[in-house]
């Protein structure tokens, strides 16, 4: 199934650990952009579903481009919102260039690696190598459990930080 929410768990964990240096927005958008490829081939009933964008190199590059897009879109939205007394996007760490590029790059790379474990048609190291040495490294159920657990741990970390900040005030 394209566009799996399980991929978001590790991204949320990245956000909880790296904070303002990591854009969860760019992470999620890179996941969605990469899965457009498999959705396209799924709708056309063409095999393989996971092609170039699912390689580690292309997925990471796609994530970087998405990160730059998030940065530019955030700045444009900020300029527009200032006319209405806003400017909230400039204060958001999600749209800062370094955070957006890091979030996008990690989103793309993790997408390729996670899909490699469970889909036989992913060739993560193409064009340097063919095949998929990561296939079946762990079971699909264990992979989904790990991703969900990463998300739950992240929520716990974020809630603890919010509680700590609230108590400090």
Image (cartoon, rainbow, N blue to C red):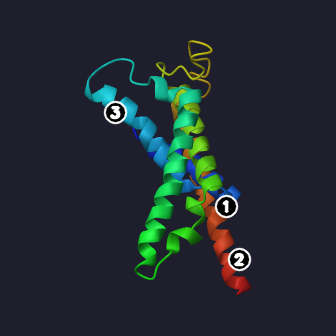
Residue 94 sits above or below residue 58 on the image: below
Mark toward the start of the polypeptide (1 vs 3): 1
Is residue 165 visible in this depiction of the protein? yes
> For the residues carrying marks 2 and 1, which lies nearer the camera in this image?
1
Q: Secondary structure at mark 1?
A: helix
Name the spot of residue 136 as percent of width and height, x first: 57, 23
Quadrant of res 128: top right
Dot 3 corresponds to which residue? 39
In the displayed structure, does residue 120 sit left or right of residue 44?
right
In the displayed structure, does residue 112 sit left or right of residue 43?
right
Q: Give the position of the N terminus as an image quadrant.
A: top left
Which residue is depicted at the point 51% across and 69% down? 89
Q: Disc 2 vs disc 1: Cβ atoms closer than 8 Å? A: no
**Direction bottom: furthest residue:** 169
Which residue is depicted at the point 39% across and 18% down? 48
Dot 1 corresponds to which residue? 19
Mark toward the start of the polypeptide (2 vs 1): 1
Dot 2 corresponds to which residue? 164
Residue 7 sits above or below residue 23 on the image: above
Which residue is depicted at the point 38% across and 30% down? 38
Which residue is depicted at the point 65% across and 53% down? 98
Q: Secondary structure at mark 2?
A: helix
Name the spot of residue 104 as percent of width and height, x first: 56, 46
Which of 133/66 is in front?
Answer: 66
Q: Disc 1 vs disc 3: Cβ atoms closer than 8 Å? A: no
């Amino acid at each position: 199934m394209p566009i799996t929410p399980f991929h978001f768990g590790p991204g949320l964990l990245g956000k909880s650990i790296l904070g303002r240096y990591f854009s969860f927005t760019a992470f999620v958008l890179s996941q969605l952009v990469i899965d457009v490829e498999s959705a396209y081939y799924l709708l056309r009933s063409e095999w393989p579903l996971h092609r170039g964008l699912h390689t580690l190199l292309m997925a990471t590059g796609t994530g970087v481009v998405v990160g730059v897009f998030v940065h530019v879109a955030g700045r444009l939205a900020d300029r527009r919102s200032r006319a209405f007394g806003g400017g909230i996007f400039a204060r958001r760490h999600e749209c800062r260039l370094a955070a957006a590029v890091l979030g996008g790059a990690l989103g793309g790379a993790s997408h390729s690696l996670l899909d490699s474990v469970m889909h036989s048609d992913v060739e993560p190291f193409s064009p340097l190598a063919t095949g998929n040495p990561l296939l079946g490294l762990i079971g699909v159920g264990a992979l989904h459990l790990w991703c969900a657990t990463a998300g739950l741990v992240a929520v716990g970390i974020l809630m603890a930080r919010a509680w700590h900040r609230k108590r400090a005030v």
